[in-house]
Image: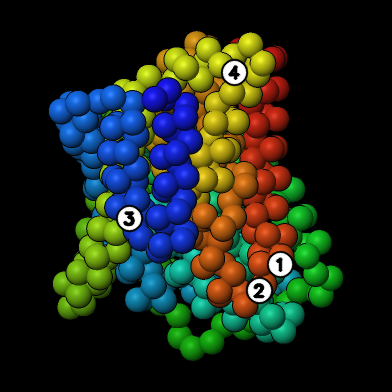
Amino acid sequence: MEPVIAFALAILLVSLMTVELGLSPFISLLVSALVFGVLTGMGPELLGFISEGLARIFSALAIIVFSGSVIAEQLRRSRGVERIVADLLGIVGRKRGLFVSGVSGYLLALPAMCCLTAYLILEPVVGGMGREAEGSGRRFLYTTAAFSVISYNLVYPSPVMVALTGTLQVAPAEALKFGLPLSLLLFVPAYLSMRRLAAAEEESQEERGSLPPRLVSWAPVALPLALIGAGLLSPQARMVGSPEVALLAGALLSAALAKNEAGEMIKKATRRAGVIIFDLCGAGAFGYVIAQGGLGPEIFAELSLAVPAVVLPFLVASLIQLAQGSRVVTAVIAAEIMKDLPGDPVTLLFSISAGAFVLSSVSDPYFWLVRETTDSDLKETLRGYTLPLTLCGLLVFSAVVIRQIFFV
């Protein structure tokens, strides 16, 4: 069977198994990898391709995801996230609660290594802040969700960026040099689109109860970011500035701050990290099998004459995102398919990243989490979650095209 047809059937199978049957993405992706391999005529080497894809993602992301889960769990248990939100309110003003809800999601998605985990940690605080300001926390929660995806899709060392830089062989500093300013520029349209969801005057909640000290709250987040920044600026600090070492240092600091509760905290964080890493490894297996099946050259041959080269990775990533919902899965699969596309690798990287924003709807677990926690219907969730993210993706892609035309 032709690789394009086999790929379409495999993506349909992923969607059916995750959305209709409720199976875990790991099982769905693994079964779909086997189906794609069989349909394209692979033999005994298929199991080797699956193992290789699993191993590549595990080696790249296991320490990062585990350490991020430990940091996130410590912030939740210690109420450190409430202190961070309160401090941000103090900086930007007491009537900027909507903006703070977005910045909180943006910041926490990086050490948590999962935008969904960041949302779960912030939801009680941000929802309460929104209910006090407007009688409903819905708009505040939509904002937190959107901003968490912005940093998750664009800022190294998120799993999306680690997967893309590794596969496409882009230096982390190059990805950060374009992705970080671009993510900050997205604050303006994302914030304005969220303000349009309602017209109520914003007010913020007063601090309730005794919050932990600032040093204890900010340190697990600030330490990894400082080490990564030092590694990017100084060759001598490159090892301690690697995402694995920096986030592991943050996890060890979190364990030290938890004191007697460290053992239980790490157990819970390990369970959460296990679910995340299994799903990512499933994406790695699926993506590697697809790459070995000759899909990339066939897509180039079919679409290169009709679709401009800069549009092709964005289009492929958008369709994969629509089909199965996971941003890391989109990044891994699209990068494996597109890695041999001629041209600037940074342009290719951010074209795929842009596609991972758009069309996130019923196949996206985050979509259903936001719908449930905001008590919204399907139409409202599409308007408050899917539409702003799609707008962000289109803006990112526009920036990529401008960069390609004028600066490459």
Give the crowd class for mark 4: few <14, some 14-19, many >=20 residues within 10 Å. Answer: few
Residue on which the image places disc 3? 276
Q: Is residue 34 left or right of residue 363?
A: left
Q: Which mark is residue 380?
A: 1
Residue in front for this viewpoint, 183 or 273: 273
Residue 1 at x, y percent in the picture = 39, 25
Amino acid type, residue under disc 4 in the picture:
Leu
Residue on which the image places disc 4? 303
Q: Is residue 43 visible?
A: yes
- Based on the displayed image, in which of its 4 quarters is residue 241 positioned? top left
Image quadrant in which the C terminus is located: top right
Q: CA distance from mark 2 to mark 3?
A: 26 Å
Give the crowd class for mark 1: few <14, some 14-19, many >=20 residues within 10 Å. Answer: some
Q: Earlier in the sequence, mark 1 or mark 4?
A: 4
Q: Is residue 328 visible?
A: no
Instruction: For mark 2, give the secondary structure.
Output: loop
Residue in front for this viewpoint, 246 or 118: 118
Q: Earlier in the sequence, mark 3 or mark 1?
A: 3
Q: Earlier in the sequence, mark 4 or mark 3?
A: 3
Residue on which the image places disc 2? 376
Instruction: For mark 1, give the secondary structure.
Output: helix
Q: Earlier in the sequence, mark 2 or mark 4?
A: 4
Instruction: For mark 3, give the secondary structure.
Output: helix
